[in-house]
Image: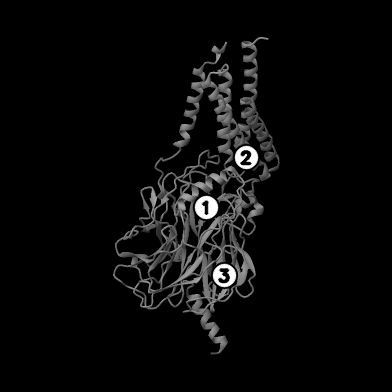
Amino acid sequence: MTGTFLPRTFAAAIGGVAMLAAPLAAQDGDGFDVSSQIGPDPVLPAPDFVNLLPSMKIANVVGWQEGETPQVPEGLVVTAYATDLANPRTVHTLPNGDVLVVQSRGPDSAPKSRPKDFIRGWIMSMSKGGGGAQKESNLITLLRDSDRDGTVDDRFDLLTGLASPFGVAWIDDTLYVAATDGVLAYPYTLGQTEITGEPAVLTPLPGGPINHHWTKDLALGPDGTKLYASVGSNSNIAENGLEAEKRRAAIWEIDRATGASRVYASGLRNPNGLTFHPETGTLFTVVNERDELGPDLVPDYMTSVQDGGFYGWPWSYFGEHVDARVHPERPDMVSAAIMPDYALSSHVAALGMTFSNGSALPEEYANGAFIGEHGSWNRDAFNGYKVVYVPFENGEPAGMAQDVVTGFIDGDDARGRPVGVGLDGTGALLVADDAGNTVWRVANADGAIIEAPVGSDGGQVEAAGEQGAGQGGD
Amino acid sequence: MQAALVSFPIACFTLALLTDLAYWATAHLMWHNFSSWLIFAGLIGGGLAALAWIVRLIASRGRIIWAVATVNLLVLVAAVFNSLVHAGDGWTGVVPWGIALSALTVLLMLASALVGGTATRRQDPR
């Protein structure tokens, strides 16, 4: 008899399945206080190592309409410094006040090995905007504000056709460019508006084919002899195997004279925004932490970087919090993990950092760091999509992060997404907006500027220059 | 037609249990990827088989054995959850819940075969 299992049972089974699935869809939105994860001692909820449907909210990039700008607090004024760029990621000021804007798109070389990779690629393409023909990217543009009035007077494409560049540094008539597969050295004298010479490869960096975190940032060391390059991990939590992670999730120290390199610090999942503190000479970075442990894990962070320091990835996060997804377990690595200095809250995607010291901005921004937060995807509510300021005291973060540049999000749309930050030749803050294809300038509302331009490479260029002059005897 | 389609998910889900066990034993990533693809392929095959079943239902050709239909639905549901677990990164994408769901899927397929066989004999004595 078919009566034993009626259609009713079949319907009940469908109903049961729906009930099972319901809590998955509503797994959060519980009003978690994001600010509890900002500072040296963030609240860390229990991790969900098995996340059936990782929470996701992707902003649709719509761009800036004529006359629209981000918002800044009272005492500051924001203007578009340069528009019609092609995915500007970082800004770098040369000692003469010229600003280099590095524009790039990630390489598209990663082989797809799982069904997830296809679905993920399709979802992520939404957050990058565009569609249709896009301007050619992967170039470096020079912006010149000759009369120092805060507007760009001349604009030159200095280098084109680069391999997904991100960081730059300049010293001794040499422009170093961190492309995604290596640090290139171009002969370049300040003031030049074109570069025609072929570069020398100072040192290769880990590139494709996977190249999951492809942005390689660059900073010149305090004594001018070393470069520091960031190399992000090749995966979320080493799911492509540890073999793919050799010398990744690390900051390299590269000798300028020989190109010899060593791992300066490791266990940093995706470090960017390399900057030396102007007073202490300590290296700082902002790091993107791991995904898919829930909307409120793991906080991205800013930290000082110790020589030889290990910061946990992939085995643990924020000190000794074990990530059970990584196998085999390595209690020895977990216990070696250094707890980072300052959490920025989860999934903000901090990608840029610069110290405010010596800027022309109001007194409340005299001593601290600006951090560019690209914005979240692995959360059900947006986080980041702004530039924040973290006050410092005695070379260490001291106090709550404050919003400085906001208004990148409009409902469920993104007009832009901040990445790299820096000070221009007048002491104003520049913000590279890769989705809005704009560089924003945030200046003191009273019009104050600094007396003379200071390069992003800091005092070390001056010191090394003096040294060089002494040796040269001219 | 439907019988031919049903053989795809049966083969894929059974092999996924084996590749899960291989990953558990070796921690070799290849087995995790194999499992993900097998479950994915099984779901596509199973989805097509379900479509064929619905078409047959609408056309009212042949008897509907609701017990089998229910268990088969549960097979697909378990496989959907299993594919979500397997989409997770690293060890916990398979151990322990991925293996558990793969085993449950196989058990449900066995149950479906048993129930189907019994029901057929009862209704259609030869």
- In 3D space, how far apart are the residues under numbered discs 1 and 3 (Cα atoms)? 24 Å
Residue A396 appears left or right of B117: left
Residue type marked 2:
Trp
Which residue is tagged 2? B37
| Residue designated by label 1 | A289
Horizontal relation, residue A75 to residue A468: left or right: left
How many labels sit on residues?
3
Q: Is residue A88 left or right of residue A209?
A: left
- Say which quadrant the N terminus of chain A sits in: top right
The answer to whether A447 is drawn above or below residue A236 in the figure is below
Q: Nearer the viewer, residue B25 or B123?
A: B123
At label 1, the amino acid type is: Glu
Give residue A254's position: percent from left, percent from top: 60, 69
Q: Is mark 2 on a helix, strand or loop?
A: helix
Q: For this view, does A200 lie left or right of residue A459?
A: right
Binning the other alpha carbons within 10 Å of mark 2 as few (below 14), some (14 to 19) or many (20 upward) gives many
Give coordinates of residue B3: x percent, y percent: 63, 25
Q: Which of marks 1 and 3 is nearer the N terminus?
A: 3
On the same chain: label 3 and label 2? no
Q: Nearer the viewer, residue A286 or A436?
A: A436
> Disc 1: which chain?
A
Please give the residue where the numbered disc 3 appears in the rendered image.
Answer: A227
